[in-house]
Amino acid sequence: ANVQSAFNGQRTPGRDFGQAEFDEAWSLMPTEGRPSPVGQHWDAAFRDFVRNPPPDLDVLAPERRFRKFPTQSKRFFNNAGQPVEVSLSVAHITPPEHTLNFHQIPTEGHYDITYVPVCAAMIVTTALSPSASIADTEGSPYGHPVDARDVPNLVPPMHRFSDLAWYLWTQATLNRGLLRYIGHDFILSEDSMSIMDHLAMIRFGNADVNLPWPGLSYGVETDEAKALLAVPNGVGVAYIMMDRAGWLGRRQPAVHIFKNDRGKWCMLWDLAPV
């Protein structure tokens, strides 16, 4: 109820998409040689947190393992040779057959996500939806900004971060209901950054403050957390909690906002079970 209140009831419910909807509009891109977001920009304390299961997750160990590895993914292993992370990069593509109405021209929509089932986590490095891509002049293949809401069937049915990230999570783990952490690294959204700058100003009087993990923390009942749920890097998390409640069960989320070692804002949602 607290999560839903951030949207005042104004939202479109998500769907359970499958392989067919993914294949008609998305392609897994090669990630070999690309850095792991978990290993590159965050400070050591956060990397240790993500890569080592918190004590209250130990009881879930038998089911915290990867379901499969796409050949295009980049895989990371621990010292025992066990899989720890898998990084996936997906890009919006032209449908293989042009009988479909949406996007005869591919957009710049793409997502880069690292899944860490051993810690029930997904870490998002890039989240640019097709609709957000065409709303920008430089990213629109039409040569001018386009509002996808004004043109029926312009974006593929499976286009929101919450739907795509959830589908890929179901491919990465045997028990989708175990998802606990959703993080955003290297946030670039002006709307998201402005809210986090404002919160830093309130606490420290300076938005440029060095703020390593765990940074500032807010429970979902606070106005600060509700504001963060409504920004571009928070709304997808809210949709996942609302649309996948049947799998996730009752959660009492909290959010951490902090800066990585490049001074860029990051966000981590802890979807703690009630």
Image (cartoon, rainbow, N blue to C red):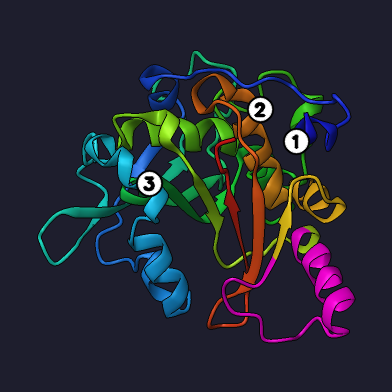
Q: Mark 1 points at which residue?
A: 3
Give the amino acid at mark 2.
Met
- Does 238 sit left or right of 273 as displayed? right
Q: Label 2: few (<14), some or many (≥20) within 10 Å?
A: some
Q: Where is residue 90 in the image (x, y as percent from the top left)?
A: 42, 44
Give the amino acid at mark 3.
Leu
Label 3 or label 2, whichever comes before in sequence order: 3
Q: Name the residue under label 3.
A: 57
Mark 3 element type: helix
Question: From where the camera sits, is residue 26 visible?
Answer: no
Q: Identify the residue at image location x=66%, y=80%.
A: 211
Say whether marks 2 and 1 touch (CB < 8 Å): yes
Q: Name the residue under label 2.
A: 242
Name the quadrant of the C terminus: top right
Between 252 and 130, the one lying in front of the other is: 252
- Does 65 sit left or right of 132 as displayed? left
> Residues under labels 2 and 1: Cα distance?
8 Å
Q: Identify the residue at image location x=49%, y=13%.
A: 99
Q: Which residue lies furthest to the top in this view?
A: 99
Question: From where the camera sits, is residue 271 visible?
Answer: yes
Label 1 vs label 3, nearer the camera: 3
Label 2 or label 1, whichever comes before in sequence order: 1
Q: Identify the residue at image location x=59%, y=79%.
A: 212
Q: Give the range drawn in magenta.
A: 192-216
Label 1 or label 3, whichever comes before in sequence order: 1
Point out which mark residue 254 bears: none
Between 223 and 83, the one lying in front of the other is: 223
